[in-house]
Amino acid sequence: MAAEPGPMLDSAEKLIATAQKLRETADEMDDRRWKAFQVGEISEKEFRNNVVRGTFLRNQISEILLEATKSVIQGIQQDQSELETAIAKAKKQIKTINDIKKALTVFATIIGLAEAIAIGSPQGIVAGLLAVKAAA
């Protein structure tokens, strides 16, 4: 599905589409984390910490969906496609990158972006987007 044109997150549809992409990324991390743990690429502590972070991300996604029915986020000049492309790239990195520690870092930036979206902070969203792009 192609991104709706125009500024990012300025409609309920864009918030919902973004939440779905974030959920898909969380699902990818769940799969990757479990596989990495099974073969000893990450410790039990790293596994548990990332499970907690994944739960936090899913809570932020729920907040985004709740907010989508109430309001939109105004004041962001970047295009919606830029946001969706960055999330898609991060999801792909989480799935395919050989270094699980790098995948965990990419996932952490996604969590920060989701939190900024959930609280509706335009500056935080832009910073989060830049962090995801730099990590992925």
Image (spheres, helix red, strand yellow):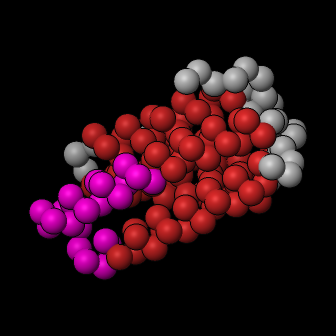
Residue at the extreme bottom of the image, as rendered: 45
Q: Nearer the viewer, residue 83 or 130?
A: 83
Q: Is residue 78 visible?
A: no
Please tell me whether residue 34 is drawn above or below residue 4 in the rendered image.
below
- The mark total stands at 0
Splitting the image into 4 quarters, where does residue 61 fall? bottom right
Image point (54%, 35%), residue name:
86
Image point (84%, 44%), residue name:
72
Measured as percent of width and height from the top left, residue 64 is found at: 70, 54
Splitting the image into 4 quarters, where does residue 78 fall? top right
**Quarter the N terminus occupies:** top right
Please tell me whether residue 67 is drawn above or below residue 13 in the rendered image.
below
Residue at the extreme left of the image, as rendered: 39
The kind of secondary structure the magenta stretch mainly shows is helix
Residue at the extreme front of the image, as rendered: 69
**Quarter the C terminus occupies:** top left
Q: What range is drawn magenta here?
A: 26-47
Please tell me whether residue 59 is drawn above or below residue 49 in the rendered image.
above
Q: Is residue 40 visible?
A: yes
Image point (45%, 34%), residue name:
89
Measured as percent of width and height from the top left, residue 25 is found at: 45, 47
Measured as percent of width and height from the top left, residue 104 is found at: 38, 58
Residue 110 part of the magenta-drawn span: no
Image point (78%, 40%), residue name:
12
Q: Is residue 39 left or right of residue 16?
A: left
Measured as percent of width and height from the top left, residue 131 is found at: 57, 47
